[in-house]
Amino acid sequence: MTCNIKLRAWGLPVLLVVFAVLQGCDQKAIEATQEPLSLGGTQVESASYETVTVKHKLGTTVIDKLPQRVVALDMNDVDFLDQLGIPVAGMPKDFVPHFLSQYKEAPQVEDTGAIVAPNLERVHMAKPDLILITSLQAKYYKELSEIAPTIHFDVDYRNSETSHIEVIKEHLITLGQIFNKEKLAHKKAAELDARVAEAKRVTLSRPEKALIVLHNNGAFNSFGVRSRYGFVFNALGVMPASPVNEAGLHGQPVSSEFIRQANPDVIYIIDRTAVMEHRQPLNADTLSNPLLRQTTAWKNNRVIFADPEAWYITAASLNSMKLIINDVIKGYDQ
């Protein structure tokens, strides 16, 4: 701020007033030059920014300045940003999990359309300087990259048997580097490690075998070790009750008779219908399936109606992993 005042041969009182005005101008100029940028409720120094180069499955993305407007096209990335205190400029609002509900009606957050088919015009309207995507939006990578630097979260939704937790933590740390939030990102990663370790302590040496099934309008799909929920068996130590190992996003169709014959000690039910049709999830009273009621899991009150939004909409972020781990542990606490 610059203040110019022309002095004349005025009296002492007038000169004193002028001197005070000049002092005020100088002080405001100093404060203006010292004021740091604000991002997500924290003070971030703007004097310098160390370039971050991110290599991912779709290419290499270079971030050479601190992003101010971020569009996240997958709910997992919205959760990462929320955990790191980074404002969200745009996101799809068709399937927003309950733990991110504050963004659903937020007027300052641009609705970018559907998770699987983002509206590129709306993405552009959000004026992003960084875009975050997963495999669900991968086919739009070229167009999105023309709008702003775009980073692909390399999580495998079809087969999470190996490295699922590590991929989550790596992406978290990368975002921490981009937004100068490395310390917080490492703290959050350590918290996730602690929850995973807790789950392993619960499942360690336990003989119970579990089945993970997806409910879809009365039909069921089973998920084995090499599937979307493979990490439950591999990383969390749950023993599988089914030999079904086919990798896939939607699992292997199975009958109620198959579930009864597998006779699991624990059943985790993910109600896809509740998510897709925005209905109340199934519970023990509303699931009227006589064959499931004959299983050991049902008889011992170990049928866990999992959080469908954490398991189905996300399952690869900090909040969703904590909720999934809570559900897994419930299967052994009943």
Image (cartoon, helix red, strand yellow):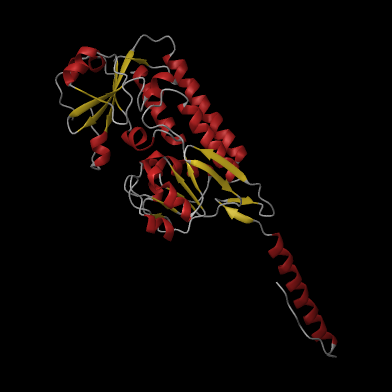
Quarter of the figure with residue 316: top left
Which residue is found at the position 85% from the left and 86% from the top? 12
Is residue 173 rendered to the left or right of residue 96? right
If the image is split into quadrants, where does the N terminus sit? bottom right
- Left or right of 22 in this view: 98: left
The image quadrant where one finds the C terminus is top left
Frontmost residue, 150 versus 215? 150
Query: Relative to 165, does residue 47 appear above or below in the rendering?
Result: below
Residue 239 appearing in the image: yes
- Specify the quadrant of the image occupied by residue 272: top left
Query: Residue at horizontal 37%, vertical 35%?
Result: 310
Q: Which residue is drawn at 66% across and 50% down?
A: 49
Q: Which of 229 and 146 is in front in this view?
A: 146
* Image coords of residue 318 (percent x, y): 47, 35
Return the x and y of residue 44 as percentages of the image width and height. Answer: 63, 51
| Closer-to-camera residue (48/217) | 48
Q: Position of residue 280 (x, y in %)?
A: 24, 38
